[in-house]
Image (spheres, grey):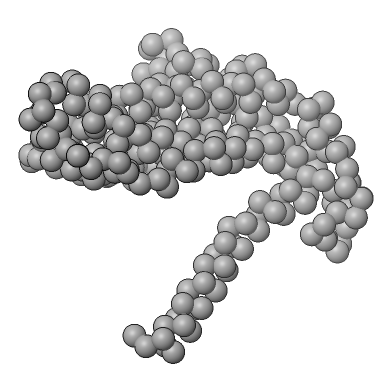
Amino acid sequence: MSPRTSRPARAGQYLALLCYLVFLAFPFLWLISTAFKPARELGSLHPTWIPDSPTLENFRQAFDEQPLLRAAGNSLTVALSAALIAVVIATPMAYVMARQRSRLATAATGWVVVSQAFPFVLVIIPLFLVLKNLHLINSLLGLIMVYVVWSLPFALWMLVGYVRAVPAELEEAAAVDGAGRLRTLVSVTAPLLAPGIVATAMFAFITAWNEFFFALVLLKSPEKQTLPVILTHFLGAEGVADLGPLAAAAFLATIPSLVIFAIIQRRITGGMLAGAVKS
């Protein structure tokens, strides 16, 4: 491809990427704008991007009307616990599936992918009955178990790919140097899997943090409800939304995911095999 034809193509790619970023950012930017608008501007027939009179009144009303801090604490407890447990279980399973190339491992990987296509409503009734027999309905522990089971297939699928990206020759070299199996896994393989483990934990956390359906069905007590469920309380009896406080609460609900991603993005994008060359 000549420079003359490659430059327009590259410009077109950048333009398409810019349009895609604008498409993704529009709802979030409009949410921030709505959160800081007074009631007078929210009811205006000519909405604006930037509020004419920014206010924090919507945030004050949101905290006064609903127990956002308690709900955020419940969501944080559930999401962190589910992410950690899912990663701890999925990591050794992924290693075995990646290193043991067999029909059983291939079938297991295929089942993991297929299981992600099951809709929530298909499993909610048997899941509810199982948790009822275990006396875990209306319990954060029961919700954590549900999130672990639901996120485990995706976490396993992600980690299998990361394990396969680690050359088996590195483990063989460590074995030649006299390292045992456990020491090889801890000293050689585990550090190289760190970016994958962090990325998998982040996705499991975000999935649990944003999940609504299971939390709505399984949690009945107001003091145990998570943040996505509490957000629905800003809807009136006739389905009319209290738009300002709802936007303020929804904006606050997105902050943890953004902060976590900002903190660990370098580890996610870092090279998995940096410094893995055996001298």
Q: Position of residue 163 (x, y in %)?
A: 24, 39
Is any part of residue 136 visible from this angle? yes
Foreground pick, 170 / 64: 170
Q: Quadrant of residue 224?
A: top right
Report the residue at 70% width, 26% height from top: 68
Vertical order, 202 against 144 (above or below): below
Q: Is residue 129 visible?
A: no
Residue 259 placement (x, y as % from top left): 59, 37
Residue beneath the point at 36% across and 18% down? 130
In the drawing, does residue 72 fall left or right of residue 261? right
The quarter of the rendered structure image containing the C terminus is: top left
Q: Is residue 36 above or below residue 79?
A: below
**Residue 65 image position (x, y, % from top left):** 80, 27
Image point (85%, 38%), residue name: 56
Q: Residue furthest top?
A: 135
Work out whether residue 190 or residue 123 is closer to the camera in this orientation and state it: 190
Q: Quadrant of the N terminus?
A: bottom left
Rendered view: 31 above or below 115: below
Q: Is residue 19 left or right of residue 35?
A: left
- Identify which residue is drawn at 57% across, 26% down: 75
Count of number-bearing discs: 0
